[in-house]
Amino acid sequence: MNQDEAAAGAAKPADESEQDEEQKKQGEAADGQEQPRQEAWAARQDLIAHGPDFISTLVTRDQFGQTGGTHYGDLNIHLGGRTEAPRSASGGPVPRADIEALAVVFQDCDSFHEALARLRTDRIVFLSGGHETGRRSAALMLLHQLGIDRILSLDPTASFSTLPGQLDPSAGHILCDLAISRSRPLREPHLLALREQLKRSGAHLVITVEPSAALGDIPSVRWEPPPAEEMLHAHVTRITGETVWTQVCGLAPVKEFLTRQHRPGDIKQFAQRLIALHRGEIDEETLAADGETAVATQIARWLTEDKPQLHDKAFLISLAVFDKAPYAVAAELGDGLFVRLQKIEDPGVLPRIPVFGSSREQRLRLARADGYVTAEVTEWGPLDGKYCAAFRDERTAQLLLTEVWNLHPSARPALAEWIRKLAEDRRPLVRTRAASAAALLAKADLSSALAHLIEPWADARGSHSWLTAANALTMAQLLNVPTVFPILRNWCTGENESRRWTAIRAYGLLGPVHHQEILDAILDAIPRQSPVQGSPDDDEMPEEARQFADALKLLLLAVREPVLAELARRLDTDHAARVYALLAFRQACDQSKDDGSGRPLVLDWYAQADAETARHLILFWEALLGDRAHHTQALGILRGWVLKAGADPDSEAALALLLPALVTAPTNHRRVSHLLETVRDSAGVRPPVAKRLLRRLSPN
C-alpha cells in the first residue's frame, strides 16, 4: 500500500460513502417507525408549492394554491438578461423615460382592458399573474393609459394598513409582489380605508400578486399576457417597420420560436436577433442556432469538454433539478453529486470540494442562468426573500438531465444514488424536486427510471418513500409519459401493499386533471368485501382504506360537481362505494378555505350551488346523519360550523339555507334542533347565532 492509499484509508471514516451508509441505516430504522400521515390534499398542496413549472397543470379552475410550504414568487433583483420594465427603488418614482420606452412596444389584451375598466371605476385593481409574465409592465401601462404623469413604486414589505398614508395626491402607484397568504390575509377594513383614501386624494393604485395569493372575496383580474407573436411583432416593427416583419415572420426559426412559451424579456432578445438578421449582421443559420439546437450544443460542451471541471458539471446538473429554486440549495446539494461522480471517474482520489471556490455570479454565468431575489411565503408568515437561480432558456433543465441519463450512462449510478438521497431530505422542496427529477428521467427512459428510482421508492418500508414514488408517477403522467396509467392500474389491483398505496395516492393527486378516468379506476379498485370495519375514526382502520377515502375527498374538492353527481348516484346502489364516498365527504366537510376566512369549503360550495348540486349535497348530509358510523361525527361538524358562523355572516347565511333543507325528515329535525339548543362556545354560553338558526327551523 503506497502513502496515498494509506492516507485514503486513514481518512475513510470521514468519507461520504460511510456517512451515506450510516444515514442509510438510520433511514431504514426510521422506515420501521410510524411515519406522520399526510393526506392527499396536503400532498397535492406540497406538490404545487415545490414542484417545477409543469406541475401547475394540477391547479384547476378552483386555483387551490399552497397551504404553507414555500413559494417562490416574482423578481425583485435583476442580474443579467431580464428585460421587463426596470424597477426603481422601493417608494420612489418610476422614471418617465422607462415608461415611455415601454409604451412604444407594450401590447394590450383582454385582461388588460378588464383591469383598466376596474381601475377607472374603483381606483384600485389587483393584478394576479405568474412571475415573468410582464405583470409589472402591465401595471405601469394601466396607470399610463389613464394619463397619469407621476407614478410611484410602493414598498411591498410594508403593512397593508399603512398604505393609505403612503399615497400621493393625483399620483399613480404600483405595489408589486404583495405577499398575501393564510397567515397574512388581506382584511376588508384595510381595503375599504385604502379605497376611501384613493378617492379623497384622486390617486390610483395597481397591486400585483401571485395567483396563489389568498384574496378571498376581493375581486382581482388574472393577468394573461398577449400572444408572443404580437409582442414579437411590436418589437420588430418599432425598429424596422411593417414590411420587414412580413419578410421574417414566416422563417422557420421564427415559427419554431413561437411554438414555445417565452418570457417577455426572451421575446425582446429574439426580436433584436431578427433585426440583426434583417441588417445582415447574422444569417438564418445563426438565428436558428439560438433555439433548441444551441441549447443542446451548449449542454454537450458542458458535459464532454475538459472545462468546466467536474465540480461545476455537478452544479449544472443540480441546477437542472433545482431550476427556479434557491441557489444555495442547488449549490449545496450539487457537492454531494460531485463526490459520487468523482468516485466513479477516479476512485483513487479523494473528492476535494473547494469551500470558497467560484463566486455565485461566476457559476451563474457559466450556467447561462440568472439570479434573482424572490418572496418566500411560508405557513409561519412571510420571510425575507431567497436568492434563486433559473436557466435563461427554460428547455435547459430537461435537456441537460436527459443528456446525462441517456448519453452518459456511466454517470447513472451516481445520479440515481444522489436523487435517492435527495428523497430522504427533511425539506419538502428537496423531496419534491427528487420526484420531479425522476419524472423527467422517466420521460427520457421509463424502464431505467422505474428500476433505479421509482420502484425502489414504492417497495421501501416507509410511507414517505411511497409518497415520493407517487409524486414521481404523478409528474410523469403530467409530462405525458406513456404507460403511467397502466402501471398505476396494475399496482392498484396487485398484491404488493406498498405499490397499492403508491398507486392510490397517485390517483388522488392526478384526479383533478383526469377526473373521470381516475374516478372510474378508484371505484373499480376499492375493496368489495367488508371495506371498512367499525367506526371510520377507528385507529384500526386500514391505511389503504384511508387512502381510498383521501383520493375521493381530493376529487370532490378539486373537481366538485361531476364527482359529486357520480358518487351520489352510487350511494344506494353500490355498498362499497357508499362506505368510502361517505367517509370522503365527511372528511371534505372538515376542510376550510385557505383565504384566511376559515370558512368550510363544503358549506361555501352549498351556498353557491345550483339546484341539482344542492340536492346532491343534501343527499350526502342525510346519508351521514342516518348512518350509525357517521352521525356523531357529522353532528360534530355541524356544531363546529355553527360556532364559526357566529363570527362569519356568510357562513350563517349558508347555514340558514342548508339546515332547513336538511331537516325535512323528523329524525333529522330532532337531531339538528337539539344541537342548536345545546351548542355552547368555549365560555359555556349558547351563541346567539344558534338561536337565530333554530328560529329558521321552527319559525313558529
Image: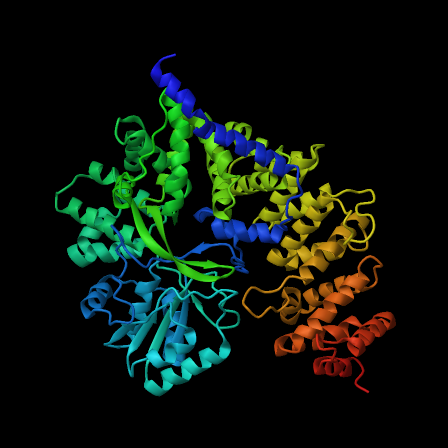
- Residue 196 lies, in percent from the top left, at 41, 85
Between 223 and 368, the one lying in front of the other is: 368
Please tell me in which quadrant of the rendered image residue 291 appears: top left
Please tell me in which quadrant of the rendered image residue 561 appears: bottom right
Tell me which residue sits at (20%, 47%) in the image: 274
Between 107 and 75, the one lying in front of the other is: 75
Left or right, 451 with reference to 621: left
- Residue 242 lies, in percent from the top left, at 20, 56
Left or right, 199 with reference to 301: right
Quarter of the image that includes the N terminus? top left
- Residue 129 lies, in percent from the top left, at 41, 61
Tell me which residue sits at (74%, 57%) in the image: 568
Q: Farthest right residue?
A: 666
Between 310 and 576, the one lying in front of the other is: 310
Residue 232 sits above or below residue 631 on the image: above
- Residue 583 lies, in percent from the top left, at 74, 55
Residue 193 sits above or below residue 77 on the image: below
For residue 99, say whether it is visible: yes
